[in-house]
Amino acid sequence: MKNTVFIIAVKKDGQLKPEYKISIESWKKWCNKNDTQMFLLEEPIVPMDEMHIIWQRYFMFDIFEANEIESDQTLIVDADTIVHPECPNFFDETDGKYCLVHDDGSYDWILRGMEHYSKYVYDGAWFDFWKYGNSGFQIVNNKHREFFDYMREFYFENNEMIRSIQDNYGIGTDQTPLNYNLILKNIPVKLLSYKYNMTCMYKKEILADDMLHTKTGWVMHFNGLPDKEKSVPHWMEKTYRYLYG
Amino acid sequence: MANMIYTVAVNHDTSQYKNSDYSQYCIKSWESWCKKNDIDFMVITEHDARYKYPVWNKDLIFEKLDTEYDKIGYVDSDTMVHWGAPNPFDIYDDEFCWVKDCSNFRWISNSIELYNKFYLNQTLDIYDYYNSGVSFFTKEHKFIYDNLQKLYKENSVELDDCATRGVGKVQTLLNFELQKQNVKIKELPPIWNIFSMHKKEMFNHNWQDGKDTTPFFIKYCWIWHFTGFPIEERTKIMKQTWELVGDRY
């Protein structure tokens, strides 16, 4: 059975952002090289005003079933990433566990999120902040289907509170609940190296004209950049050209 | 046998800022914590003339001890310990313990490149790189410090020149040396050496909560390392921290 790379690529106003096309191109090439299939989620499953599109990735197993897609392991990756053409096959490093990469880009954002969710949703529960993973790169397998079902149930049961937290505190969508739910449901998690999800590259001081970011890791995640409307397309285009010609 | 923690707090003309201006807060916090936890504490204040830069004095610890300690902790003089921190000597056996450094990969990459000439047959991965500002080890690690002393003796001119290039003086060498000797490492979580706090936004508090204004680093970490931001800010921030929590010690 093949592995799969799953990307959300829903168009906005009939257009997919050019930088997302770049991301998809890079992943297409990586998939071809690594005997991996690719799936693009191009239409939302439920209206996006009912459920943020990011939350809809937890329909993945149902989508695969409906489309008769068989997958051994699946990487769910954000469309603001570029994979290096020489990136090793990370599916070989999972040990069959739920894989994430630790996020230390802004502990202000992370700890505020953890505190708010602890207080308003998880009845004071807490976990070690250095085990917190970024949800923009998740590797799962069929053992995790039940957990995905739970993520959706959790969303619909806590919909109002989740929306209120998202709107009032600006601490993201699924990432903090994902981390809490993995811990509280005792799902074995493996944190992979930063090189597989290079978040906040600006803060790590690798995103510069010498393209150090292309030499220090494999999956470049163009988040956490200042002036993102301009900087993200700029850096993604420049990086793609540098790596793929 | 007892355990001990030491720091190096030397005022020296090669330092841009007077060490005692900020190390006074380090010493106050560690002295108090060590007393509470029945751990010996030593401050090295005299510079050894064998070295140009005072940071190298930390490698002389085994020369300076007149008691044999089972386990030893080194902390930079720009650290402070949380008054309620648990005892780090309880969390390891015979390993060399420290925290990974992933705050500035450019600096790390440049530092590895510069210091690699002293360890020609080795390659050091930036993802296997640790911060030397806080470490816990045992008496069995004496040979590591002996080797570093020997390395300095044989390469002092070149090493002192490297020290002016803005990519550290001793940290990368310790990383190389431990790798060379295949020393068993225990990676500690960042709470045992939280550095680059400005960049990690650890000086912030939950400003949306309205009640608790405790900065995150105080709330969630045990050893606070005031580095990775402009050095002229260091004394001010350590002083502010002491003013905020000094009465808890």
Image: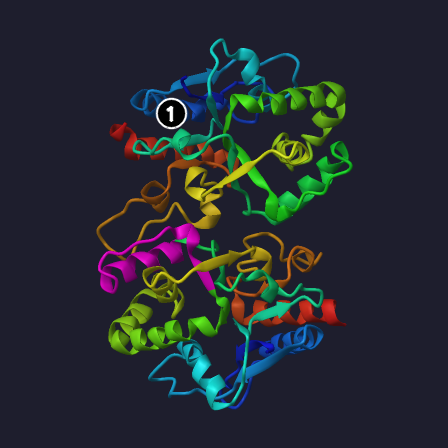
Q: Position of residue B200 (x, y in %)?
A: 46, 49
Residue beneath the point at 22% across and 60% down: A123
Assess whether residue A71 is covered by the magenta stretch: no
Which residue, as the protein is rendered here, is positioned at the far top?
Answer: B66
Q: Quadrant of residue A192?
A: bottom right
Q: Where, quadrant-wise, is the N terminus of chain B in this rendering?
A: top left
For residue B128, above or below residue B15? below
Residue beneath the point at 77% across and 72% down: A245
For residue A3, above or below residue B46? below
| Residue type at tag 1 | Trp
Q: Where, quadrant-wise, is the C terminus of chain B in this rendering?
A: top left
Span colored in magenta: A108-134
Q: Position of residue B26 (x, y in %)?
A: 41, 26
Q: Position of residue A179 (x, y in %)?
A: 38, 62
The secondary structure type at the circle numbered 1 is helix
Question: What residue would you read off at disc 1?
Answer: B30
Q: Position of residue A99 (x, y in %)?
A: 50, 63
